[in-house]
Amino acid sequence: MPHILALDQGTTSSRAIVFDRAGRPVATAQREITQHYPAPGWVEHDPLEIWSSQLAVAIEAIGRAGLTPADIVAVGITNQRETTLVWDRETGVPICHAIVWQDRRTAEACEGLKRDGAGPLVQRTTGLIIDAYFSASKIQWMLDHVPGARPRAAAGELAFGTVDTWLLWKLTSGKVHATDVSNASRTMLLDITSCHWHPELLRVFDVPAAMLPAVKASSEVYGATDPSLGLGTIPIAGIAGDQQAALFGQLCHEPGMSKNTYGTGCFLLQNVGTSPRPSAHQLVSTVGWRIGERTEYALEGSVFIGGAVVQWLRDGLGIIRTAAEVEPLADSVPDSGGVMLVPAFAGLGAPHWDPFARGTIVGITRGTTAAHLARAALESIALQVADLLEAMQADSQVVVRELRVDGGAAVNNVLLQMQADLLGVPVVRPAVTETTALGAAYLAGLAVGFWDSADQLASQWRVDRRFEPRLSPTAAVALRRRWADAVERAKDWARPGARPTLSD
């Protein structure tokens, strides 16, 4: 029986999932990847580990499904976005580690661009806000700090790519250097109306056009896997950044439909139709996907630290042994005991965009326990998403009637009940929560005729559980006001020169 293979390369792991024609996951394989923190605020990945882990889980997932590569009709790719890689076109060797989307090393450079007045051009052209989060300043940093990189890039010897481009290059053994419009729209170099690289932005960020990939649709055949890899010759036919893929996989195909993904960060997206919608409330406008000649857009709010706060409880504080333990621990107390945790470990994303904010815990007393911290951590995820939805409704003038959710932390019932309580609208968890990979599978399947149309997919979306609001609106407002106060205390903490040290 024919199946689709989705490659889901995320911030903390590489996964591969095999889907059948009904959109059901048949087999999954996953491997964690190493996080490198060479300096405060810096986050890196090894591109070769990204590749080796992704190839390994692809082969493993096909085997677990009891299939052979001949049973796979197409491969879809979805990926952590903005993470930046540069490699030698001839050898395929990266010039340095990948700079991850969470990395803040270029924050000062971005602040300088804002002071120089580049903000309006960037927002008008790309839909984005100048920030170290996006790829452009990361490319610039690599070219300026890796010896010899800039002249080699100008000569066309180096290739840039986000993770999708890197995987496509490796899967085709260097035959295809391309990206899709959804990933390209996260670089801060793409005109999202024309879907072409913008010459003026290349000048602003000093990025040579010679190193950029071709920009393609999200659903088309880009090339095929090289048979030497052990995957046979399979068409690679769908690519989308992880959050756009999740929006597509949640079947939010009509304007106004919204989803939130609880992954390492949190990402709230709303389909706004075939024209980009500028944001007046510190959100970003982004390409959702392109199929054929039709490009659809989304409004997006990004939270840098979502589920990663649970990893911090596990790995940093050691108060839980596994991520799953946070739910019963948080549920063992009725509230957080007045504790507020602002997980600004990598600054604050939308709607604040403060690269110098840092993690803050307020309200601790002698009675504070690990359970209170666990509950405050979960509340911090839900409170950040509530801030995003408020801004999104103000921008779109669309009242969200329900929020579809997915991602690793969406299995946490306590978190989703908190979310419904704070939003005052139902939160709906689908039967298949692997909607990021599913979206990539759908895009690939549509390109090769595995599914006839996006309309055919609508019947595949099924509800697992619906969480209705239980908290009074008055209590929800009071909690959000308290949260806003805590966020203000976290802001601007790490600005250079803002705080004295003993060495001063």
Image: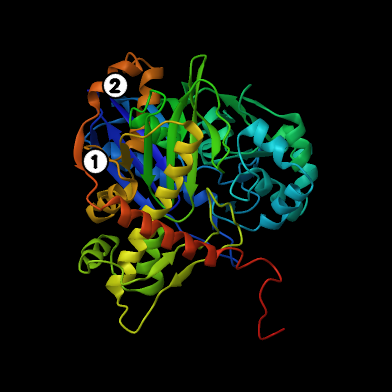
Q: Which residue shows up at 22% across the image and 66% down it?
A: 334
Left or right, 244 with reference to 277: left
Quickly name the residue at label 1. 64
Residue 183, above or below 289: below
Quickly name the residue at label 2. 457
The kind of residue on which mark 2 rests is Leu
224 or 368, nearer to the observer: 368
The kind of residue on which mark 1 rests is Arg
> Which image quadrant is residue 462 in?
top left
CA gap, disc 1 and disc 2: 25 Å
Left or right, 352 with reference to 429: right
> Which image quadrant is residue 135 in?
top right
In the rendered image, residue 472, in percent from the top left (x then y), is placed at 26, 52
In the rendered image, residue 113, in percent from the top left (x then y), is placed at 75, 48
Q: Which mark is residue 467?
A: none
Residue 68, above or below 464: above
In the rendered image, residue 214, in percent from the top left (x then y), is placed at 62, 26
Q: Mark 1 or mark 2: which is in front?
A: 2
**Label 1 or label 2, whichever comes before in sequence order:** 1
